[in-house]
Image (spheres, grey):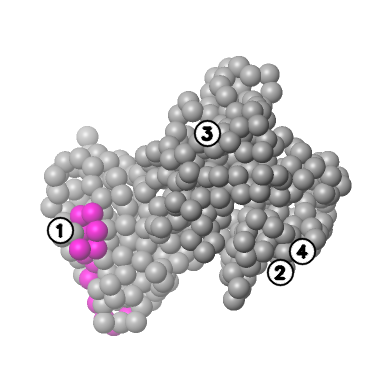
Amino acid sequence: MRIIHNKGVCDPHVHIFNGRAYMFTTHDRGPGQPIFRMDDWRIFSSDDLLNWRLEYTLRPEDTFLGKCEECYATDAAERNGKYYMYFSYQQYLIGVAVSENGPGGPYKDALGKPLIPKGMVDTACYDPTVFIDDDENKTPYIMFVFTCIGKKYYIASLNEDMISLAEETRPVELQPNWDSDACWIEKHNGIYYLTTHEARFATSKSVYGPYTYHGKFMYDYTTDHGTFFTYHNQTYFTYGIPENLGDEKIDPYYRTTKIVYAHFKDNGEIVTDEFIKINGVGQYDANWDVIKGEWYFAASDGIYKKENKDGFELRGIGNGSYLYYQNVERMRQNAPIELRVSNGNDKPCTIEIRENSPFGAVLGCLKVGSTGGFDRFETFKLELENTYGTHNLCFVFRSEAEEAARFEDFRFTKVRP
């Protein structure tokens, strides 16, 4: 499902700052352009991934560039209380702006000249991504460039000031090489993921590479300039598609953005959901056949996804753990609900279904005894005490056991005609 309609929001890079999602984007001018026309860069923010507000617009004339109409992709990072916005002009160069007033700006040109000037490397220079590693120094890196022209990405670590390079740029080896652009670095279970345009991905044990190419992990009409982010213990993939997707004549130069849940399998593969690709994240419908556990909007620390024969289950659930599903629409009054849960203990697990938060009003409560093993899921039913309409549901687990339960999905019993 598209977000932020008819505003030309594209090339999305989402970062979580101060508990809120900030999306740094380019800005397609409008429908009917003969090529990409992008006049500025914009920042949107949201706390529910559904409702986004415009925080700031960085205009090229407020930087060393002056007025231009080829404002290519941007990314952002935080360091020592300051926020940095990296922007590219066409395929030529990369600059940086800084905000001391928070991630929403305003941003000022930090250098008055490019950070990555034209000619620094032997390929085009644009579409930067800034990655902060999880080592002791939280080392920042910038990766950029275009693999179709020169067949290379380049990477360099940044100094503590975030506006100068700490080393010479290095070419990134790809095994085998492939044509793409719009790079992004993600780290999962100690493995570096390099993802690019059209949801292509490669992995490496070093941020510098070499990266081994694995192919595409999802398909849409386009998966333009996709990036990952993690919010409330959930991982998302966000990317661009044409705004008028579905029309007879598709306009590739006027785009919008979509967000889907992303799941990492044990073998390193990335999985997304076809159903969510259509219906969107952060909202649910009581008339859906099933609401999968891994589609949560928020989960307490320690909960993680683990693949099983049916897809994924949720593990790491202990006493006081919770799962939160916001905006569950069209719930019947006193809705009958079914939960798929396993319990391998001889101690029961109590599941409280609360309104809005782990401390909200209790809408229902059920006790899950032993199911004969954590690999044996059973269906448990109860009737909630709720009004008709949209509700935010929070499942809270109580148990004396170290592992309280495992959770697979839930659904609402439909009325038979």
Mark 1 vs mark 2, CA separation in Å? 47 Å
Mark 4 touches mark 3? (CB < 8 Å): no
Mark 4 vs mark 1, CA separation in Å? 55 Å
Q: Nearer the viewer, mark 2 or mark 4?
A: 4
Q: Is residue 81 left or right of residue 39?
A: left
Q: Nearer the viewer, mark 3 or mark 1?
A: 3
Instruction: Look at mark 1 in the image and give the residue it sits on.
Output: 361
- Measuring 71% from the left and 69% from the top, which residue is drawn there? 205
- For the residue pair 303 and 288, the one nearer the viewer reads as 303
The earlier-in-sequence mark between 2 and 3 is 3
Image quarter where the C terminus lies is: top left
**Image x and y of residue 27, in percent:** 56, 32
**Image x and y of residue 303, in percent:** 41, 68
- For the residue pair 315 and 369, the one nearer the viewer reads as 315
Q: Is residue 370 left or right of residue 275?
A: left
* Count of numbered tags: 4
Residue 9 numbered tag: 3
Q: Crowding near pointer 1: few (<14 within 10 Å), some, many (20+)?
A: few
Instruction: Look at mark 4 in the image and give the residue it sits on.
Output: 167
- For the residue pair 411 and 95, the one nearer the viewer reads as 95
Q: Secondary structure at mark 3?
A: strand
The earlier-in-sequence mark between 4 and 3 is 3
Three-letter amino acid code of the residue under disc 1: Ala
Three-letter amino acid code of the residue under disc 3: Val
Three-letter amino acid code of the residue under disc 4: Glu
Q: Secondary structure at mark 2?
A: loop
Q: Is residue 355 magenta?
A: yes
Residue 205 numbered tag: 2
Q: Crowding near pointer 3: few (<14 within 10 Å), some, many (20+)?
A: many
